[in-house]
Image (tube, helix red, strand yellow):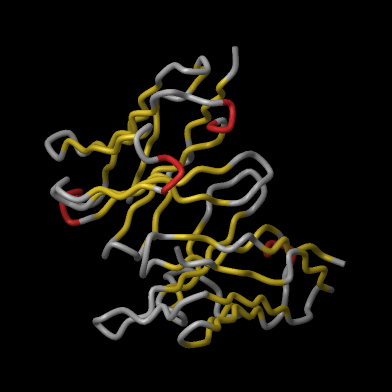
Amino acid sequence: EVQLVESGGGLGQPGGSLRLACAASGFTFTDYWMHWVRQVPGKGLVWVSRINPDGTITNYAESLKGRFTISRDNAKNTVYLQMNSLRAEDTALYYCVRDAAGGLVDYWGQGALVTVSS
Amino acid sequence: DVVVTQSPPSLPVTLGQPASISCRSSQSLVYTDGKTYLSWFQQRPGQSPRRLIYEVSKRDSGVPDRFSGSGSGTEFTLKISRVEAEDVGVYYCMQGKHWPSFGQGTRLQIK
């Protein structure tokens, strides 16, 4: 069974940093792209970032470039999202998402809630 | 960037009646391999999104056959042949050809 379990969410300070992690199991992690998608409660889905299977290609939503960094540790079957210079508008539920082909998203985790507030 | 536009934003439907959601892309979603990376997701209240349809019309395992997808190029449709109570939620289309992007969502509710 495919499982994606996010961790690392919580309260962050404006201008501060948080790192999310997503532990994957139930599939061959190194065969898949991985994404982060966020959702402000009650609002729509917004793509944040993606990384290819060997970690050599990363892409970001234009508005987030320079503040967020995606990475992965294939030995630990884990993908990360480092979030720096946090802003109130980064408050959202962050989903870890699997992708079979660079644009074929399928399974989603349960999400990690990030709240940015002083 | 590819803009994906969904309509309607809200869709009240009587139980047992059909429903249809439209998704339009600002650019063609046909990839170099001939595939079209357009998917549909259902998000029930309090849950994570679940994929229903991928590559325009392929139904995921376990998805009832009352759900169907169609379209090509830049115009796509999700249809529910007979709405059931468990179909309540928000539906999103997503394009995966360029930087991934989602439609704004369609909230399906029972009339």
Quarter of the view holding residue A22: top left
Picture coordinates of residue A56 (x, y %)? Answer: 14, 48
Is A24 left, or right, of A107 in this rendering?
left
Which residue shows up at 53% across the image and 30% down it? A113
Which residue shows up at 52% across the image and 87% down it? B71
Q: Quadrant of the C terminus of chain A?
A: top right
Depth order, front residue of B67/B107 = B107
Picture coordinates of residue A76 (x, y %)? Answer: 17, 33
Is A93 left, or right, of A24 in this rendering?
right
Depth order, front residue of A27/B26 = B26
Which residue shows up at 25% across the image and 48% down it? A58
Which residue shows up at 46% across the image and 80% down it? B56
- Residue A79 vs B4, above or below: the answer is above
- Residue B107 vs A74, above or below: the answer is below
- Residue B82 vs A115, above or below: the answer is below
The residue sitting at the right extreme is B111
Depth order, front residue of A103/B111 = A103
Picture coordinates of residue B48 (x, y %)? Answer: 53, 48
- Residue B107 vs B78, above or below: the answer is above
Picture coordinates of residue B42 (x, y %)? Answer: 58, 61
The residue sitting at the top extreme is A118
Is A57 left, or right, of B44 in this rendering?
left
Count the labels in the image. Answer: 0
